[in-house]
Each structure stands twice: as structure tokens, then as C-alpha cells.
Amino acid sequence: MPALKERLREIFTVEPVLFFFMTGTFILAPATQQLTITKVCEELYDNASICAHPEDHKGDAEIQTKASYIMLVYTAALSVVSIPPAMFLGSWSDRVGRKCGMVVPSLMSLAAGGGLVAIAAVKGANAYWTVATAVVTGISGGYVSVFLSCFSYVADVTDASSRTRRMALAESMIFIGGMVGFLLSGFLLHRFGFVQTFGSYCACHALSILYVLLWLRSPKPRDQNLTLEGEEEEEEEEASRTCVRMSLLKYAQMSFKAVLRERPDKENTKLNLLILSTFLNNVISVGEQSVLLLYLTYKPREFTTELYGVFNSIRMLLLGITLMGIFPLLLRFIRETTLAKLSALTRMASYVLLAFSTNTWMVFLTAVVGALSGITQAVVRSLSSAIVGPNEQGAMFSFMASMEALCILVAVTLFNGIYPLTLSSFPGMVFIVMAGFSFIILIIIQWISILPPTQPRLVIKTNPLHLNPITGTAAISCYSQTFATNHKFSALHWKTSKWHK
């Protein structure tokens, strides 16, 4: 029985964490928007019966304008506040473990959820209090911290042969959780109300915390291994012992150093291209969500809110199933970079089709055409983690996650600016721009595919039970990983663990 439990703990790692967190996130997003509209309505009209159904006031320009402004401030606060903690959390987690980056955001989200329950329950509560809950969530890094911690964990516990598949499985939980959260939000708001909806949001984060604390194993500390790398960090052993005393600015600096430091065989170029691909990918994703509802409810498509929910859920389900089932099968026969290029190509085609869609079946067809769209980012995360050293995984994902948070501001500003300007002439222009960004990602992946492949590192372990009788140092034993023969030995450094009595 213990053996079965340990085997299950190897199979189920951070996937439930991402599932619970994204389910809660997609419960929160529409519920917060509806709550903001309701509170603005109560402030303007002071009539509970008029404001009981916020969907009835979509045509009220004054309510829409003020609610839109508050939601913009809410989004900006959540994004900006989450970037600084994310910048130092990655390097910090490289030394003390990944669990903290998963637990703390859920704890702060629980506090924010309690605040939203209070705002919903108190009649006359100002809508701007929702911005305060965004700040509470953002202090912990929010979803940025969860993403970097989870994907760093996957990089820690997998080898090169299985990393891409495990990254794809973790990535699929974002879409599956999004689908479940989106459906739950509509059902809970319609049947029960705000208090129960935000209570369910809190329950998701409580389950995530319990899972991390009671089930998830801490990955083996990297500083117990000996690793041949391109460059050894200065005073790493000392930093590990004094990590608690180090300043937050120092950890943020480590994130930048992990990304910018010199690497052999054009690895710097490859990593920079992967980061650019991540930035563009997230600008597209955030921009799409910011204008899609407006576009689909506009003539001639004229989607209802319910039909929009069905479309979004089907699309997320297809993305999740593709990453969980189809992608691992395709990896048996096709290179991961080839699949990433195919993913970018189909995503580009789906946006072009969406831009010219005039009826319901054409819109739903875009979900089928773009079912492979999630593969690109899964491959990008896997390739990025292969480039950096074992003790730089958190720092690298920290930098990338911070870029993702910055994408929210860039995407909302860009696409919400383009959409009204082209509404009268060609409403689908925003999706043509997204298709153009997808084409740039395709070019980037092609560029990466012709660069020298990243070589596996030789990982060596020390055995403290076998001591050299003369030197008193630990004996060294190797275990299997391929050593890259084309790496220059002069650029590699042996890292040893000294025996302490």
C-alpha cells in the first residue's frame, strides 16, 4: 500500500494545484464583474429591485462606463502588484522549495474571497473595495507565483525524455480548470448568488492548500547534487545557508542574471527567443479574452451570454483534451518543435476564420481549428527549462511569469484600443492582428529549431556514507544522464558538497 501511494504521488504532482487555482480564477472573473456592475447600480439608483439583475443593465451607458473603469483599475492593480513578489519568489524557491509559492497565493486568495463575500453581503458597499481584494491577491504574486512554482516543480521532478509531456499535462489543467470554473460561475450566480459563488471560490483555494500540504512531495533539493553546468553561481553554497537573510532585491537580481548570463552554443539567443514567444503568446491570450465577448455579441453574430459560455467551455475543453491526450501521442512520431510550429499555424488560421465569421457555426468551427493552439506554450516552457541549470529553474520561470503579468496591461491597452477604432469598418481587425502575432511566433519557433539543440547535463551525486580516508571528502558516484561532448570542458565547473562532521 505505501508503494502504491508513492507511485500515485509521482503521477499526480502539481496538476490538481493548477486545476483548483484556475477553477477558482474563472469562478472569480465573471462574478467580480457582475458584482461591480451591481454595486455601481446600487450607488447610482439606490434601488435593490432595479439592481438585482445586472445583466439587465448592459445598455445603461453610465453604469457600463463606471463599472468598466473600476474593472480596469482592478486588473491593473492585480497585475502590477503581482510582478515584484514574482520576481524574487522564483530564485527564493530554488533554495527553499516550491511549496510556498503554491500555498501563499491561495492563502491570500482566501482572504480576498472573504472580502468579496463581505462586499456582496453588505448593502451599499462601494464597488472600489473590489480593487482592495485585487491588491490582497497580488501581494502574494497571484497566479504568476502559482504558475512559476508549478512549472518549476515539473522541471525539478522530470528528465529530458518526459519533461515536454508533463509540461503539456500541467498546461492542460489551465484550460480544464478554466472550463469548469466558467461553467460553475454561471450556474452559481444564476441559482444562488454572490455569497455562495465567492464561497465556492474560497473552497477551491482551500482544497489547493490541503492538497499541497498533505499530498505533494517536496522535490529533492538540488544542492545535494553535483552538476556539470555552463557556469557555477558565485557563492551558491553560502547563499543557500543565508537565503533567509538575503534582501528581496537580491533575489530579483538573480532572476535577471539567470536569464541574461552568458551560455555556450547560442543558448542565450534561444532563451531570449523563447521569452519573446511567451510574451507574444500571452498578449494574444489576454487580448482575445478582453474583446471576444464584445465581438461575438455584436452583429451579425449576436451571441447571447449563454451561447458565449457554451463556446468558451467547448473551446477550453478541446484545448485541454488535445494537451492531455493527442499531444503525447503525436510526440511519439513528430518532433516537439514541429508540433509547436503546427500549433502556431493552426492558431493563426483560427483567428483569420474568426475575423471573417458571420454566423454561429463559423465561430464554433474556430474552436476545432484552434484545438492545437495550447501546444506551443507547453513546448516553450519545456525548452526553456532545459536551457537553464537545475538551480535556476525558479528564477527563469519567475522572469517568464512576470512577463505574463505585464502582458495583461499591454494586451488590454492594445486590443481594447484597436477594437473601437475598427468597429464601424472591420470589427474582426483585432483578430487579424492576433494572427500576425501568431505568425511571428511561428517564425521564432522555426528560428529556434535550426539552432544547435540543447544538450543534457551530466548530474553527479555525492554519497556521504563513503568517505575518502585521507581527505575526508565524500565519494562521488555518477548516475545516468548523457554528457554533451560538444560542450567545452573549460566552461564547466564541478560542484562538490563537503563533508561536515
Image (tube, helix red, strand yellow):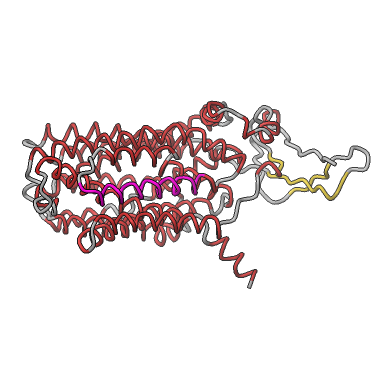
Question: Which is nearer the eye, 370 or 298?
Answer: 298
- The image shows residue 73 at horizontal and vertical percentages of 26, 34
Q: Is residue 264 visible?
A: yes
- The image shows residue 192 at horizontal and vertical percentages of 23, 62
Choose top left, top right, bottom left or bottom right for residue 436.
top left
Task: Give the residue at the far right of this rendering.
Answer: 470
Tell me the quadrant of the picture where the N terminus can be found: bottom right
In this rendering, would 488 be left or right of 471?
Answer: left
Q: Is 205 within the magenta?
A: no
- The image shows residue 80 at horizontal and vertical percentages of 36, 32
Question: Which is nearer the eye, 254 or 327?
Answer: 254
Q: Is residue 164 above or below residue 501?
A: below
Tell me the quadrant of the picture where the C terminus can be found: top right
Q: What residue appears at the point 16 percent right and 44 percent down from the top-left corner?
A: 355
Q: What residue appears at the point 25 percent right and 61 percent down from the top-left corner?
A: 188
Question: Which is nearer the eye, 157 or 102?
Answer: 102
Q: What residue appears at the point 33 percent right and 34 percent down from the top-left corner?
A: 77
- The image shows residue 138 at horizontal and vertical percentages of 39, 38
Q: Is residue 266 visible?
A: no
Q: Is residue 93 above or below residue 492?
A: below
Residue range (magenta): 101-123
Numbered circles on residues, count: 0
Q: Is residue 344 above or below residue 359?
A: above
Question: Which is nearer the eye, 372 or 254?
Answer: 254
Overall secondary structure of the magenta section:
helix
Q: What residue appears at the point 60 percent right and 52 percent down from the top-left corner?
A: 218
